[in-house]
Image: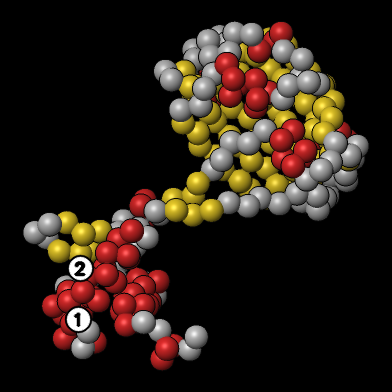
Amino acid sequence: MGKDDLPAYEKVKGWIRQHISSGEWRPGDPVPSEAALIERFGVSRMTAHRALRELAAEGLVTRVQGSGTRVAQLHRISSQLVIRDVHEEVVERGHVHTTRVLLVGEEKAGADLAASLGLRKGARVFHSILVHLENGVAIQYEDRYVNPAAAPLYLQADFTQESPTLHLLRHAPLTEASYAIEACLPTEAEAKELGIRRGDPCLAMMRRTVSGANVASVARLVYPGSRYSFAGQFQA
């Protein structure tokens, strides 16, 4: 379908969307009213109303009774992170998932770690380091610290049979999560366990999960760049 074949409401939407995406209209700026759109495009009130209603549903504009329509604040369009178990991801691809457990134990939290977990310095924390493999090839190095108050049975889990993510989802139901993804070079230990060179690029996800009143865990998940990619969705 060519541009001239678009329904009238889609033409109106496209014109508004172009002004927003170009930066000409900034978050909080007013968007032309239905009456202004009717005059500009020669469309019916129903068409103008539909265009604005659909843009609002997509999160690009906000409509407030008595104050008109404005460009939405950026926070209304956000990345949706789905916390998934790596075992499930691998099995869905029809492959075999195995885990190599490098460390499971208890430590005292330093100042930075304690702050991340919402604990006092020196508080006891659980620490696990695992390598996840797909058909025998390492795809993820998982370095995780866990708040004992959120998951008191963490050290008793068999992580060759149940991943830390699945254990936490079962015993410390997720209520909030934050994450950051960056390109990085692996540490010496990460490179060794992943079977890659120190100069091979990786993707690292830093993830913090909350369960009720407690920060449940903070984790650094490192993926060889040649073996893994992230995908997601955006939703208003």
Mark 1 Cα-neighbour bin, 10 Å: few <14, some 14–19, many ≥20: some
The answer to whether residue 177 is left or right of residue 139 is left
Q: Earlier in the sequence, mark 1 or mark 2?
A: 2
Residue 215 place in picture, x, y as percent: 50, 22
Secondary element at tag 1: loop
Residue 172 place in picture, x, y as percent: 54, 18
Observer able to see residue 58: yes
Q: Compared to 153, does 131 lie above or below?
A: below
The answer to whether residue 134 is left or right of residue 208 is right
- Report the amino acid beneath label 2: Pro
Q: Circle 1 sits on which residue?
A: 44
Secondary element at tag 2: loop
Residue at x 39%, y 53% (from the top left corner): 236
The label on residue 30 is: 2
Mark 2 Cα-neighbour bin, 10 Å: few <14, some 14–19, many ≥20: some
Residue at x 89%, y 39% (from the top left corner): 135
Q: Nearer the viewer, residue 182 or 7?
A: 7
Residue at x 15%, y 64% (from the top left corner): 68
Residue at x 35%, y 52% (from the top left corner): 76
